[in-house]
Image (tube, rainbow, N blue to C red):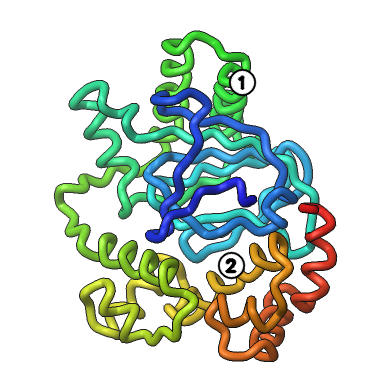
């Protein structure tokens, strides 16, 4: 079973360590996702740190490589996922903080709006040789360790607020009330539509209609937010879903191709090999050993 719970709008439900507590912390292994997690988003702020190995990380259309000792901050509501086409082993720590933590005061709510909105930076790579970034990494690791050790709730909240404050100092302030967020809403509606209807025959017009915009605007928003065309994004999502079925089921190649929106099994195999440099059957043979 995939460790993530992804909804039809591509949002993720996180299984927090403590019910009702706005911080999630976990050490995980990339192989548990078949070396490619589903593309998703959530309103939470996310911090990733690579304990061992290497992982590629997709964030709103750009892919970065994270090596051992490196981390990344991912801003709120950004499409993202980790993967390794080379099947590199990777142990990583994730700390995720829900925006409800900003409800403490009016000033903290403004911080969320002005530092972590859709027009702010998408992500910040964290290197241990940069002093302020090393401090952020250390704060993140302490919060993770204290969450696992079940320290006092107020202590954990204080550490989470300190971590947010440290990263916010290096994000340009943008007042969200001056921004028309129609584009953001349209884009999330369109990606949600793709994630719900990827198994069907979709046109750019269908995708644009789901965002209540025209075809050209649709293409502009995908280029702006994920640096891809709508069709390229659709194909990539279909491939990630096919990986899940290859790992977790014994369905035939033809059945998987149909369930993932590919018209023929030969076209599916061709696109899959171009993306992952191996056939679907080769991928299944390698990854079902991990899961079964």
Q: Residue at x 78, y 68 (%)?
A: 284
Number of numbered labels in the structure image: 2
Q: Nearer the viewer, residue 138 or 8?
A: 8
Is 223 on the left or on the right of 285, as rendered? left
Q: Nearer the viewer, mark 2 or mark 1?
A: 2
Residue at far top of view: 152
Percent across and percent down for residue 142 are 59, 20
Dots 2 and 1: beta carbons under 8 Å? no
Secondary structure beneath disc 2?
Answer: helix
User: Which disc is residue 201 wearing?
Assistant: none
Percent across and percent down for residue 187 are 32, 66
Is 147 on the left or on the right of 214, as rendered? right
Q: Nearer the viewer, residue 152 or 135?
A: 152
Is 18 on the left or on the right of 116, as rendered? right
- Mark pair 2, 1: CA separation: 31 Å
| Whether residue 82 can be seen here | yes
Q: Residue at x 80, y 49 (%)?
A: 89
Q: Nearer the viewer, residue 204 or 227?
A: 204
| Whether residue 129 can be seen here | no
Instruction: From this view, report whether residue 224 is shown above or below residue 52.
Output: below
Query: Residue 109: which quarter of the image?
Result: top left
Instruction: From this view, report whether residue 251 is shown above or below residue 172.
Output: below
User: Which disc is residue 148 wearing?
Assistant: 1
Percent across and percent down for residue 202 are 41, 84
Q: Residue at x 57, y 84 (%)?
A: 262
Secondary structure beneath disc 1?
Answer: helix
Query: Residue 180: which quarter of the image?
Result: bottom left
Query: Residue 275: which quarter of the image?
Result: bottom right
Residue under label 2: 241
Mark toward the start of the polypeptide (2 vs 1): 1
Instruction: From this view, report whether residue 206 is shown above or below residue 55.
Output: below
- Give neighbour class at mark 1: few <14, some 14-19, many 20+ (Cα, 10 Å): some
């Amino acid at each position: 079973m995939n460790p993530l719970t992804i909804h039809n709008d591509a949002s993720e439900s996180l299984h927090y360590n403590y019910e009702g507590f706005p911080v999630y912390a976990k050490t995980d292994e990339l192989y548990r996702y078949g070396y490619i997690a589903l593309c998703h988003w959530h309103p939470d702020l996310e911090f990733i740190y690579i304990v061992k190995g290497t992982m590629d990380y997709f964030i709103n259309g750009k892919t970065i490589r994270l090596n051992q000792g490196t981390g990344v901050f991912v801003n709120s509501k950004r499409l993202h996922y980790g993967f390794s086409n080379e099947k590199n082993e990777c142990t990583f720590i994730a700390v995720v903080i829900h925006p409800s933590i900003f409800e403490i005061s009016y000033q903290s709510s403004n911080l969320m709006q002005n530092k972590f909105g859709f027009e702010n930076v998408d992500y910040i790579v964290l290197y241990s040789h940069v002093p302020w970034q090393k401090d952020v990494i250390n704060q993140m690791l302490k919060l993770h360790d204290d969450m696992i050790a079940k320290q006092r709730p107020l202590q954990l909240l204080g550490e989470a607020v300190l971590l947010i404050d440290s990263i916010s100092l290096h994000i340009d302030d943008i007042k969200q009330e001056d921004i028309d967020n129609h584009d953001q809403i349209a884009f999330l509606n369109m990606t949600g539509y793709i994630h719900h209807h990827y198994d069907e025959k979709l046109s750019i017009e269908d995708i644009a209609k789901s965002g209540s915009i025209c075809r050209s605007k649709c293409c502009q928003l995908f280029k702006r937010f994920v640096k891809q065309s709508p069709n390229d994004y659709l194909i990539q999502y279909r491939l990630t879903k096919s990986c899940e079925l290859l790992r977790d089921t014994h369905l035939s190649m033809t059945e998987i191709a149909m369930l993932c929106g590919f018209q023929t099994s030969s076209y599916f195999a061709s696109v899959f090999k171009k993306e992952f440099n191996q056939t679907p059957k080769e991928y299944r043979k390698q990854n079902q050993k991990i899961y079964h």
